[in-house]
Image (cartoon, rainbow, N blue to C red):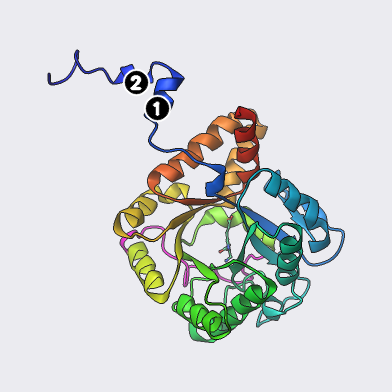
Amino acid sequence: MTGFPQIRLRRLRRTERLRALVRENQVQVGDLVYPMFVVEGRGIKQEVTSMPGVTRFSPDRLPPEIEEITRLGIPAVILFGIPQHKDEAGSSAYDPEGVVQQSVRTIKQAAPELLVITDVCLCEYTSHGHCGIVVEDRVDNDKTLPLLARMALSHAEAGADMVAPSDMMDGRVRTIRQELDKNGFSDISILSYAAKYASAFYGPFREAAESAPSFGDRRSYQMDPANAREALREVEQDIAEGADIIMVKPALAYLDVIRQVRNTYNCPLAAYNVSGEYAMVKAAVQKGWLDEKAVVMETLTAIKRAGADVILTYHAKDFAAWKADER
Ligand code: PBG
């Protein structure tokens, strides 16, 4: 028997029972992390124009939203802060009373079991919108490191379970790990945005987080989209420096990178289904050009099939609600 007509691959596609039996990959709600934007102030609940369905909350308005997220069975959120005050050194980022620090405390009170991950990066907090300290129009790597460590520590002190550096400075995982360990937080894990590309797909996020750079772009620190081997070097470094989970970002245009990282390393792997990927789906759905549920299911499954264990996605709440309906 060497093939057709004895072999017919369609046999196992005949019914949904058969297809489910041999299905290789399945996304579960338990794989998802829901990204949230928290704004300093009171009584704020506003939708992000370019990300329909995504809302920015002030800390006092978080509890009902957190209850919904917990009820849907989503295991984790990642927080991005929008401060009232921005300066050259991003000082609101490591203020113990900062918006993320306040939000972590509020969330831990409302839902102690929900995993709270915090994004560690200065871009939302600096007046120039770059991810580090600027010296003569250049982002200075080594001057930025202690500030990132201070920011991560203040998140841990507020009660975060995991910190996620997204700045792309060299050596930040090691610096953060040392600072956490020195201060008694050796159990707090690091999710490193190891291979983060300088991507145009972050556009809507920058509106949501008010974090677009005021001059230049991020190509001197984020990766060149043309490179895949370099992603493996980034991942290798971050694992050596103590990252617990590594991430590839964005997801969809970088599925090959996700697969190569998965094949090369045994570290848990996350992928970020970013704002631009979400906005494209939403825009087409609003025009009636795509079937939202089908497209989101297919997309998230593809990210999983590429090798991601964890998926950060703005579709998390919708996905969880659809899964609940299926039961
Ligand atoms: C901060 C950060 C960005 C994103 C996550 N963390 C924006 C950027 O690097 O400009 C993008 C997330 C998204 O697009 O959904 N550095």
Q: Nearer the viewer, residue 19 or 212?
A: 19
Q: In which quarter of the image is ligand 1?
A: bottom right
Estimate the x, y position of residue 40 in percent, counting from the top left. Answer: 79, 67
Task: Classify mark 1 as within 8 Å of ligand 1 or not, answering yes or no.
Answer: no
- Location of residue 283 (image quadrant): top right
Q: Which of 137 and 262 is in front in this view?
A: 262
Give the structural element (helix, strand or loop) at label 2.
helix
Give the structural element (helix, strand or loop) at label 1.
helix
Q: What stretch is highlighted in magenta?
A: 211-229
Residue type at mark 1 is Leu
Please say if 61 is above or below 280: below
Q: Mark 2 points at which residue?
A: 12
- Location of residue 268 (image quadrant): bottom left
Mark 2 closeness class: few <14, some 14–19, many ≥20 residues within 10 Å: some
Q: Which mark is residue 21?
A: 1
Alpha carbon of mark 1 to alpha carbon of mark 2: how far? 9 Å
Q: Earlier in the sequence, mark 1 or mark 2?
A: 2
Instruction: Give the prevailing secondary structure in the magenta stretch.
Output: loop
Assign the N terminus to one quadrant of the image.
top left
Whether 216 is among the magenta residues is yes
Q: Which of 138 and 245 is in front in this view?
A: 245
Estimate the x, y position of residue 286 in percent, counting from the top left. Answer: 67, 33
Estimate the x, y position of residue 152 in percent, counting from the top left. Answer: 60, 75
Is any part of residue 31 visible from this angle?
yes
